[in-house]
Amino acid sequence: MEIQEMKSYDVKAIANFFIERAIEEGKELSPMKLQKLLYFAYGLYLAIHKKALSSDRFEAWKYGPVIRQLYHALKGYGDKSIDSPIFEVTSEGLKLRLVAPRIEDNDENKEVLAFLRDFWKIYKDYTAIQLANASHLSEGPWKKAIDKPRAVIGDEDIRTYFESWLSSK
């Protein structure tokens, strides 16, 4: 089955969606937990909507699926809870400013925001270890790719796995 092209969301904006909810609700959200939440959200969205949530791809790292740029943006937290959205430097003419990427709450983004809200409600209370263990299952896409260091985990493998996982529920 072909994966549809769609508006691609900035992975930092998706991450900030989860970070901001965790801060608002007083939930612990370590970089590891965030990476795993993003992986499961990506896989489930792909399985349900047949569209990739972001153009950023997960790599098979030793401890699970990782988006490299998020790893580098958040590694300073170590295993501590993230206490601030991710910011980027943007320029307007000669002025530089910090901006936290976000998904605008409008009609164009209604589907993805509804999905992310529902996903957060279900998965926010899982620990980083529970999510990591679930991402390491022997038949999963990470396991297939881990033999190739930092290999990109293919969307087709992710979609197929999460479709199968959903049908078993």
Image (cartoon, rainbow, N blue to C red):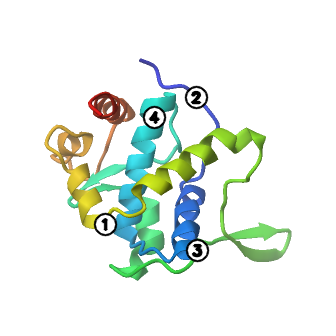
Amino acid type at mark 1: Thr
Secondary element at tag 4: helix
Q: Earlier in the sequence, mark 4 or mark 2?
A: 2
Which-is-in-front pick, marks 2 and 3? 3
Residue 57 in view: no
Q: Earlier in the sequence, mark 4 or mark 1?
A: 4
Q: Which label is found at residue 5?
A: 2
Give the percent coordinates (x, y) of residue 124: 43, 61
Residue contact at pointers 4 and 1, CB within 8 angstroms: no
Residue contact at pointers 4 and 3, CB within 8 angstroms: no
Secondary element at tag 2: loop
Whether residue 44 is situated above or below residue 13 in the rendered picture: above
Secondary element at tag 1: loop
The quarter of the rendered structure image containing the N terminus is top left
Q: Earlier in the sequence, mark 3 or mark 1?
A: 3
Relative to the observer, which residue lies in front, 103 or 167?
167
Q: CA distance from mark 3 to mark 1?
A: 18 Å
Residue beneath disc 1: 127
Q: Which label is found at residue 46?
A: 4
Whether residue 127 is situated above or below residue 95 in the rendered picture: above
Q: Give the residue displayed 38% in from the left and 64% down from the top.
A: 125
Q: Give the residue displayed 52% in from the left and 48% down from the top.
A: 118
Q: Earlier in the sequence, mark 4 or mark 3?
A: 3
Q: CA distance from mark 4 to mark 2?
A: 11 Å
Q: CA distance from mark 4 to mark 1?
A: 23 Å
Q: CA distance from mark 4 to mark 3?
A: 27 Å
